[in-house]
Image (cartoon, rainbow, N blue to C red):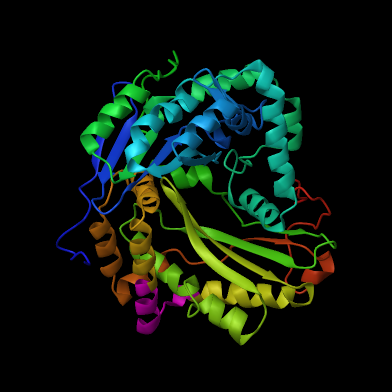
Amino acid sequence: MTAHPSQPRSTAPRTQRLPNGLTVVLERSSSSCVAALELLLPVGAIHDPPDLPGATALTWAWIDRGAGGLSARERQDALARLGVRNGGAAGRERSGLSARMAADVLPGALRLIADEVAAPNLDAAQWELARTHALHDVEARDERPDARLDLALAVATFQPPYDRDPMGTDDGLRTARPEPVREHARRRLRPDRALLVITGGIDPHATLDGVHDAFGAWEAWEDPNEEGAPDPFGPPADAAASVLRPGAPHRRYLADPDLQQVQLGWSWPLLAAHDPRSAAQGLGIAALSEGSGSRLFARIRERYGLAYEVHARAVALPGVAWAEAYAATTPDRAADTVHRVEEELRRLADGVDDGELERARTQSRTHDAIQAETAGGRAAQIVRDLLLLGRVRTVFERDHDLRQPDLEQVNEALRAAPCTQPAFVALGGAAATFGGVGATGAATGSRDGSKVAM
């Protein structure tokens, strides 16, 4: 039987902070027999010491080599016996662990998951293997043109230290030593700036008891120069000034004649998520690039036949947001693709019409509702809300926020953050490929997107 909107299947999110500072959010869904866990950690590439690039990537690879006195193999076997599907990734500002499992095995899984951050072995005998795994990740990244484009676009979009690669650099990983990385892990793996979200078919009271038992002994490193940990969630006032590159946007060309396609990327500032106009702005971005009826798909791909893939998306960190657009094409169509895409990006500031808005609204509401139907998707929504807004919205509040903006509000939001001079990166072809569009940066044959001549 389909649930009526007046009969929610989920309880309101419950938030509590443990004595050690760990923020815990629990939300029960009566329709799920799955439990999803997201653990967000205050360690990211922006926190790497200047003389230790790649410290976060190495920390991540090293804690994966054993914890709680168990080896990596013993931990994998223990999780496999419980049927837990787990993973994680190092990030730019924060890093995260995730796990999915049958709800009734959650109590047994919590201790194993907690040990990875609260009691990692950081065994010296596992150091070289951890470094090898981190180096393999960089090598695999460098073989993917889209990943190289993302890295180069980050350099064009962010100012230091936000322009760092979360995977680290080959040189940084090879020259790092275990003791500084161990000290970095001790400083950054701290509960008072971490977030644990658990959703699905759980008993919130019993789950909270289990969280206390598993994570309660996790201690924060005391920094004598710190007057107290600030509130780790919600938007800081000065984020935009400290994250995005100031001044004129960068345009970069990375020539690589070995590539058969050309990868194109753009970025430009948006209204931050906590801005009251953000939801309206999001609907405008959806009109640009949500579904086959969107402007980029209908015009760039279908009308002009210029790109075999083209899309855009809004991206956010606490207190700051930006848009990224992407197109993949052939060298002979590259210059025309750049011209046509940038024309559509500029034209968005002129607004959308009623038909475009309602199509975008329906697409966005459907996507959000489908995501909330799974325990893992709902956990991701809670994490995003708490980080960007400082509070958690219910599923129905999220839907209301998408229903509310009218055409005038959407178009006003689009005018407030126009794409007039986006940062731009092209990868592939030769410098002559882009002869018709001009550049402020010189082309380079480097395969490392972080090493681009300006």
Identity of the residue drawn at 52% across and 41% down: 87
SS majority, magenta: helix
**Relative height, residue 375 to residue 301 (above, below):** above
Q: Along the horizontal axis of the image, is 414 left or right of 69?
A: left
Q: Position of residue 223 (x, y in %)?
A: 45, 16
* Frontmost residue, 392 versus 226: 392
Q: Position of residue 243 (x, y in %)?
A: 52, 45
Q: Position of residue 274 (x, y in %)?
A: 34, 52
Quadrant housing the N terminus: bottom left
Most extreme residue toward the top, as rendered? 224
Most extreme residue toward the front, as rendered? 81
**Relative height, residue 33 to residue 433 (above, below):** above
* Frontmost residue, 332 versus 110: 110
Most extreme residue toward the left, as rendered? 6
**Relative height, residue 372 to residue 430 (above, below):** above
Residue 352 among magenta residues: yes
Q: How many marks?
A: 0
Q: Along the horizontal axis of the image, is 219 left or right of 260?
A: left
Identity of the residue drawn at 31% across and 34% down: 24
Residue 379 among magenta residues: no
* Frontmost residue, 161 versus 113: 113
Q: Is residue 106 visible?
A: yes
Q: Along the horizontal axis of the image, is 62 left or right of 230?
A: right
Q: Is residue 235 visible?
A: no
Identity of the residue drawn at 76% across and 47% down: 448
Identity of the residue drawn at 40% across and 80% down: 356
Q: Position of residue 230 (x, y in %)?
A: 36, 29
Q: Which residues are magenta?
A: 348-362
